[in-house]
Image: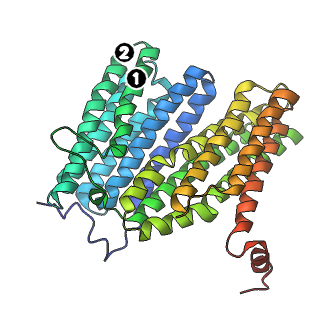
Amino acid sequence: MARPSHLRDDREKVDNSVSPLELFFDLVFVFAVTQLSHYLLEHHTLAGALQTLVMFLAVWWAWIYTAWATNWLDPGRAPVRLVLLLVMLLSMVLSSSIPAAFGPAGLSFALAYVAIQVGRTFYTAWAREGLGRGSTKNMLRATIYFAVSGCLWIAGGLDSDPNRRLLWWMAALAVEYSGPSTFFYVPGLGRSTIADWNISGAHMAERAGLFIIIALGESIIVTGATFAELEPSHATVLAFVSAFISSVAMWWIYFDVGARRGSELIEHDDRPGLIGRQAYTYGHIPIVAGIIVIAVADEQVLTHPTGHLEPYFVAALVGGAILFICGAMLFKRMTSGQQFWPLSHCAGLVLFALIGLWAFVGHPEPLTLHIAATASFLVIALWEWGSFHGGWTERLERLSGSKG
């Protein structure tokens, strides 16, 4: 039978907004995102980028599955609270292991991750027993996927060779990331259905938006902490302002139209689980990854605003921006209700392609290139801002106070 002492009440009768414990839980992932950007900064090679990608995908998967779990579990109830705090502790171990995950801390990283995924998912299945055989079997199937991939994670943690460890962990992620797309198909247990993924759409949208805030917050922290350690100069002040405006523009691009429209769609659609899988579980990956990568470029432009243009700086700045814009485009296409790509974002991709070409041909200073990237983000944000809700005329009338 279902265990109501662990579950949220009927979602039709209660507010399913994010709880204070979920916000507290997210603090660990501010630390995790910081660790990832620092790791990429210190390992700016192809191997380092792949290692950072694998760890990022693990961190994201641990967080997003917890967001799904707390959609059903009630964080205000004592048993759930204890489980989330335990997951939070294990997430601290996971985050602390990131700097040496491909060295001596590999097994710690793997064991913490496997314990989070298997333990929390099995607990959710146990707590939801009786809600419907499909609902419970869905979580049991997911537990099986994590148990199978867990063997690969641990094997990688035991392998002392960092290149082989990378292959083990990539194989583990391939198993896990195939789960939702195959509806957790397990021979003998069949596959899940969309009905098994009945969620509160508003809760899922709010949780995803908060992770974007986590990633942008880490970028702000990096900018402020780096600037505080520098001797102020004309170049460093300009770099500081450019990095801050870049973060603001990315926030605007995501939240002004996309986040609000996505929340409205998933809240009122009769298939919130499907939208949760496509637009939030998978669709937010490039958005968050882009923000993390751009944070590396922000730190570099603050410490080296002038002089030679390093290839990894260009890769972080242009590559991170393209990741973010493509992710935002994909998310907005999935949640617009229409099959179209935002024209402002398409123009933004062209601008960043030109910035990349300029870096290759013209060799501008890092600060000049960063300011050009920030200006491109502003173009996208202002273009989209003026394209909705009556266009530029109504927007400017509202700002001037002459209307409404």
Q: Position of residue 293 (x, y in %)?
A: 62, 37
Residue beneath disc 1: 106
User: On the rendered structure, is 315 left or right of 77?
Assistant: right
Q: Is residue 152 above or below residue 221?
A: above
Quadrant, the C terminus: bottom right
Of the pair 327 and 225, the residue shown nearer to us: 327
Contact (Cβ within 8 Å) of mark 2 with mark 1: yes
Quadrant, the N terminus: bottom left
**Residue 336 makes an appearance in the image:** yes
Q: Position of residue 49 (x, y in %)?
A: 57, 27
Q: Disc 2 versus disc 1: distance between alpha carbons?
A: 9 Å
Q: Is residue 404 above or below residue 259?
A: below
Mark 2: give few (<14), some (14-19) or many (20+) Cα within 10 Å: some
Q: Earlier in the sequence, mark 2 or mark 1?
A: 1
Identity of the amino acid at label 1?
Answer: Gly
Q: Residue at x 75, y 79 (%)?
A: 398
Identity of the amino acid at label 2?
Answer: Asp
Of the pair 242 and 84, the residue shown nearer to us: 242
Q: Residue at x 88, y 30 (%)?
A: 362
Q: Is residue 177 above or below residue 151?
A: below
**Residue 233 makes an appearance in the image:** no
Mark 1: give few (<14), some (14-19) or many (20+) Cα within 10 Å: many
Q: Residue at x 66, y 41 (%)?
A: 322
Q: Residue lying furthest front in this view?
A: 339
User: On the rendered structure, is 189 left or right of 25?
Assistant: left
Q: Position of residue 284 (x, y in %)?
A: 51, 49
Instruction: Tell me, for residue 159, which label it has, or none.
Output: 2
SS at badge 1: helix
User: On the rendered structure, is 262 left or right of 348?
Assistant: left
Give residue 152's quadrant in the image: top left
